[in-house]
């Protein structure tokens, strides 16, 4: 037998179902964002951990010119080293029948016997190559991009000689989750892939029999990689070592880490904001909803229910709503979280996916939401439940309104009474009006906070690809070449302009902080690839000193005029003290530039170049690519339009998925809140409005009165919402900041416009729904009853 | 079930009519129909050349706006507007209103114009409601238990305002009430019972409100 009070509760829930649903959805959106954001991040993070561990991803990496295999034992003897893998690694041009532009492959040797010790490949299909054969395993992404299956052949220019390589399997590797070609800004699996070949084939081809040119080391747990790196560098110095580097500088890992860090930033910043906003809104809406029940509360008390029973009754009412919201939110959050983790796992080519579920997160999400709801209810009931029943049952004493600006005589008479009503109503409850404005402002703000990054990425693209790196393509040579190579490039078909660059791996250090970066030398007055200052004006590289990007300056705590230690990691491997002559804008990577002549003087290498930037005649691409395929000296050509495309596909896509989900949830919150505001203000003023209808006001006039208030609240909320949204965006840029990307804080006007438009749309729909209820207002009831 | 059956009623311009009857006798339904709040399912209700039975929703709104003044038992003033503003609320939409100040003066509230409902007594609030109803210079003034929530002394002041309004604006005034004492101030008294007019009575002479009591 259901008790009468419970029956009343169920009936109330049914009577108010659209509002109940809207509130539940607001709660659900708050809960879902937290659960999905944290869930996706944690699952991906756990997956990466498991992947690294099961495939023995190394802790330290090094490249060198050539060292005898016997050196391996010395490295193994270094204190803290757990395992060592030596191998041969070379970049080569590949000729693929399905594309005109040349592709590059990184050739990596597989041990002749036994499994790889470190950086084990995960064989996706086929088998490992037989020793002594021109067979290879290809990276999955590359094979897929070219439709290469087992038995497929590709032609690779190995040490100046074309060789046919037969693909016998495809594999993933923790080392190449992201595959970036040399000098490429963005991974491109079509134009850069990995081929694993037997050591017995690869080593002799490059005259590295009994030797190696790459090294991977795993460390005993808890060992500081820097001390081991120092020992390794000492050992490799004689063999052309280019400086060992820790896992965090490994390109693929760094990229993946940046992505995960962004996901984490998103899950750390946006969802708690959403949760708080939804809790605040739920609290406010429920307390207003329950205030409307004043008479009924009086009635219950008059019949003999205790104050406590009344509180419990309404507590039960919000509990049912909150439970609904939490269940929907958790279910949606888990579902979206798993979906998103799947999407990202495919995107990162993880071989498997580990789902983690964190009960603490569920608990926090559910607890915060429920507490906010219950607090709102109890607060509202408390005001009424302790009144004497007679007082509670009577309508609240008419509110004492005040005149605004009463010192201006008869000011209010210049406006219509409708305007006076609306403004008095708003100013009479300043706290409640402020809370309503705040509520709508927060809806606007979470929309701004979700939507801004699209414009920001566009800005980043515009600066990077249209104002800074304006070249159509860049050719990187296999090794440095004399200045005259520039003239050979200029003679290639379709090349309209070519500018040289010199790139060298260096280590910048200032005090204890050091970073490996690529120091790029560019021609004085270069017009294709430029560097921009803080105001985005092109900077002429000074004749002395180094120009560094703002993110590098920030990391190393350097300012213009400071001295910085630059250790060259190639060639003579000298260390220099150089002046920071300017700080420039850069969003991608840590970058440093010098005038090419100053750089060559510093390196004491004479006038050499590492490659060229090109402006191309688009109609002659094919001829150029054909020519390049036959140029052994060119190891890699990066094409800017592909880089841009890849950029959009990686960072942009990554952010887009998440942001779209958040923006949708923000829109749900905005709608839920505004709909409830409109409905509640109709309930509060329904009687007044019905009286006016009796007096001869039209439906349109009544609606204008009612919605006028909502309109004012919504309009006043916009600038505030923009401001708060901007602050959310600022917090997010800080959270997004990684060493690979810096997302600029650019909130375009159209972001504000969209946020406001969505809120206006929610207002319009709510207005229409309320308008329909106004049409059904019972005028006769007003004549007979008190409130 | 019909709330009203076979009601045949006509009012002259300027007449002051009191309608008496117990709860459920149909007097409110009657008031709703002639006030344009509800439509009769059959029969005919006319105001001058307006056919209220066949009028559209919008036409009824127009009718209420231009010709009818309502006074409710519980005043139904807008709490956020002062007395004067409550009256202006109606004069702003009426086609030939009197000055709001004049309407308030008519009910003796010229000194309380800038007070909010919360600052006025029940009787004063009801007089504001009367001023609000007559300010549009209605042809019909409909009052549903106008003294129902008031004590006798205050009620009489309200009735005085009402009769004065009736006399000065010439609005046909219908007052619905339980209170038989009020009948004596009317030109005509109509008794409702079981959905029909049970009897009608013309007062030979009208009493002043101050002469009645309950």
Image (cartoon, helix red, strand yellow):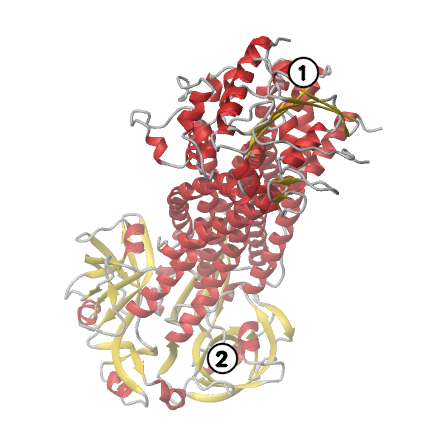
Q: Report which residue position mark 2 lands on.
A: A202
Q: Quadrant of residue B60?
A: top right
Residue at left 25%, top 78%? A499
Q: Nearer the viewer, mark 1 or mark 2?
A: 1
Instruction: Report the residue marked by disc 1.
Output: B179
Can residue A506 be seen? yes
Residue A166 location (% of width, % of height): 57, 84
**SS of the residue at dot 2?**
helix
| Badge 1 element | loop
Q: Quadrant of the N terminus of chain A?
A: top right
- For this rendering, which residue is in front, A741 or A605? A741
Residue A344, horizontal then vertical, whole percent: 56, 60
**What quarter of the picture does the C terminus of chain A occupy?**
top right
Res A38 visible: no
* Camera-nearest residue between A604 and B43: B43
The residue sitting at the left extreme is: A543
Vertical order, A234 against A467 (above or below)? above
Left or right: A532, with A149 as reference point: left
Please state the horizontal and vertical placement of residue A563, each as a whole percent of the image: 19, 53
User: Label 2 crowding class (10 Å Cα cut-off): few <14, some 14-19, many 20+?
Assistant: many
Q: Nearer the viewer, residue A129 or B37?
A: B37
Q: Please state the chain letter of the residue tagged with numbered disc 2 in the rendered image.
A: A
Viewer-nearest residue: B143 or B168: B168
| Position of residue A38 measured from the top left corner of the image (x, y, whole percent) | 55, 47
Q: Does residue A218 appear to the left or right of B152 in the view shown? A: left
Q: CA distance from mark 1 to mark 2?
A: 113 Å
Disc 1 chain ID: B
**Looking at the rendering, which quadrant does residue B141 occupy?**
top right
- At x 46% / y 70%, what residue is drawn? A69
Describe residue B118's horizontal placement relative to residue A332 as left or right.
left
């Amino acid at each position: 037998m259901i008790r009468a009070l419970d029956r009343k509760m169920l009936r109330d829930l049914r009577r108010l179902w659209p509002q109940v649903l809207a509130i539940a959805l607001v709660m659900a959106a708050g809960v879902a964002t937290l659960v999905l954001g944290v869930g996706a991040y944690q699952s991906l993070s756990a997956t990466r951990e498991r992947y690294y561990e099961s495939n023995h991803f190394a802790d330290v990496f090094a490249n060198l010119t050539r060292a005898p295999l016997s050196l391996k034992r010395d490295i193994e003897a270094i204190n803290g080293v757990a395992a060592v893998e030596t191998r041969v690694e070379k970049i080569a041009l590949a000729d693929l029948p399905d594309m005109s532009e040349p592709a590059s492959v990184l050739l990596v040797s597989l041990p002749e016997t036994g499994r790889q010790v470190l950086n084990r490949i995960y064989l996706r299909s086929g088998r490992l190559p037989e020793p002594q054969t021109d067979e290879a395993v290809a990276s999955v992404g590359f094979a897929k991009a070219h439709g290469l299956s087992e038995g497929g052949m590709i032609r690779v220019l190995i040490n100046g000689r074309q060789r046919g390589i037969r693909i016998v399997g495809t594999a993933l590797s923790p080392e190449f989750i992201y595959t970036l070609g040399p000098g490429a800004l963005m991974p491109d699996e079509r134009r850069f892939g990995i081929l694993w070949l037997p050591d017995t084939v690869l080593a002799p081809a490059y005259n590295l029999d009994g030797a190696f040119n790459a090294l991977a080391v795993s460390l005993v747990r808890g060992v500081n990689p820097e001390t081991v790196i120092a020992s390794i560098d000492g050992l490799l110095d004689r063999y052309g070592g280019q400086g060992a580097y820790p896992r965090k500088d490994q390109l693929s890992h760094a990229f993946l880490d940046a992505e995960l860090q962004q996901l984490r930033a998103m899950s750390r910043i946006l969802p708690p904001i959403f949760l708080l906003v939804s809790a605040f809104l739920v609290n406010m809406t429920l307390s207003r909803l329950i205030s409307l029940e004043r008479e009924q509360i009086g009635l219950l008390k008059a019949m003999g229910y205790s104050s406590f029973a009344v509180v419990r009754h309404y507590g039960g009412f919000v509990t049912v709503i909150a439970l609904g919201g939490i269940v929907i939110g958790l279910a949606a959050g888990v579902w979206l979280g798993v979906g998103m983790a799947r999407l990202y796992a495919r995107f990162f080519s993880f071989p498997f996916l580990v789902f983690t579920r964190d009960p603490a997160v569920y608990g926090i999400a559910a607890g915060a939401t429920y507490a906010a709801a219950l607090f709102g209810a109890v607060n509202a009931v408390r005001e009424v439940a302790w009144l004497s029943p007679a007082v509670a049952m009577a309508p609240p004493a008419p509110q004492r309104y005040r005149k605004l600006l009463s010192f201006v005589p008869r000011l209010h008479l210049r406006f219509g009474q409708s305007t006076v009503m609306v403004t008095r109503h708003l100013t009479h409850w300043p706290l409640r009006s402020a809370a309503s404005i705040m509520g709508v402002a927060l809806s606007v703000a979470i929309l701004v906070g979700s939507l801004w990054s699209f414009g920001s990425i566009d800005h980043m693209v515009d600066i990077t690809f249209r104002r800074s790196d304006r070249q159509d393509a860049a050719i990187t040579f296999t090794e440095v070449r004399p200045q005259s190579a520039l003239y050979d490039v200029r003679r290639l078909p379709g090349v309209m302009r070519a500018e040289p660059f010199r790139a060298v791996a260096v280590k910048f250090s200032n005090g204890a902080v050091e970073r490996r970066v690529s120091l790029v030398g560019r021609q004085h007055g270069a017009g294709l690839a430029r560097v921009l200052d803080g105001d985005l004006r092109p900077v002429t590289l000074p004749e002395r000193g180094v120009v560094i990007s703002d993110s590098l300056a920030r990391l190393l705590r350097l300012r213009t005029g400071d001295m910085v230690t630059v250790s060259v990691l190639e060639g003579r491997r000298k260390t220099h003290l150089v002046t920071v002559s300017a700080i420039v804008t850069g969003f991608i990577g840590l970058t440093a530039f010098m005038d090419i002549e100053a750089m060559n003087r510093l390196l004491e290498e004479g006038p050499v170049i590492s490659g060229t930037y090109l402006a191309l005649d688009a109609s002659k691409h094919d001829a150029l690519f054909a020519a390049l395929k036959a140029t052994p000296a060119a190891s890699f050509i990066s094409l800017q339009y592909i880089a841009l495309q890849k950029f959009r596909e990686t960072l942009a896509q990554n952010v887009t998925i998440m942001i779209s989900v958040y923006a949708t949830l923000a829109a749900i919150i905005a709608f839920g809140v505004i709909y409830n505001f409109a409905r509640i203000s109709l309930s509060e003023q329904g009687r007044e409005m019905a009286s006016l209808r009796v007096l001869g006001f039209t439906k349109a006039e009544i609606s204008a009165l009612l919605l006028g208030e909502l309109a004012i609240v919504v309009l006043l909320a916009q600038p505030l919402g923009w401001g708060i949204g901007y602050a959310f965006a600022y917090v997010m840029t800080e959270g997004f900041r990684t060493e690979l990307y810096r997302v600029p804080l650019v909130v375009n006007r159209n972001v504000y416009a969209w946020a406001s438009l969505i809120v206006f749309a929610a207002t319009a729909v709510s207005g229409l729904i309320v308008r329909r209820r106004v049409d059904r207002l019972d005028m006769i009831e007003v004549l007979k009853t008190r409130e | 079930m019909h709330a009203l059956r076979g009601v045949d009623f006509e009012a002259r311009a300027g007449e002051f009519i009191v309608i008496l009857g117990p709860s459920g006798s149909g007097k409110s339904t009657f008031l709703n129909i002639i006030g344009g709040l509800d439509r009769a399912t059959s029969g005919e209700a006319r105001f001058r050349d307006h056919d209220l039975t066949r009028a559209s929703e919008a036409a009824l709104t127009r009718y209420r706006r231009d010709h009818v003044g309502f006074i409710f038992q519980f005043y139904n003033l807008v709490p956020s507007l002062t007395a004067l503003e409550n009256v202006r609320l109606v004069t702003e939409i009426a086609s030939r209103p009197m000055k709001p100040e004049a309407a308030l003066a008519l009910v003796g509230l010229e000194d309380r114009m800038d007070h909010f409902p919360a600052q006025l007594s029940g009787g004063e609030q009801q007089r504001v409601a009367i001023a609000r109803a007559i300010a549009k210079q209605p042809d019909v003034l409909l009052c549903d238990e106008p003294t129902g929530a008031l004590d006798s002394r205050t009620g009489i002041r309200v009735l005085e305002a009402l009769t004065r309004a009736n006399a000065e604006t010439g609005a046909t005034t219908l007052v619905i009430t339980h209170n038989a004492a009020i009948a004596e101030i009317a030109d005509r008294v109509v008794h409702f019972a079981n959905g029909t007019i049970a009897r009608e009575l013309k007062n030979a002479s009208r009493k002043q409100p101050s002469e009645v009591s309950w």
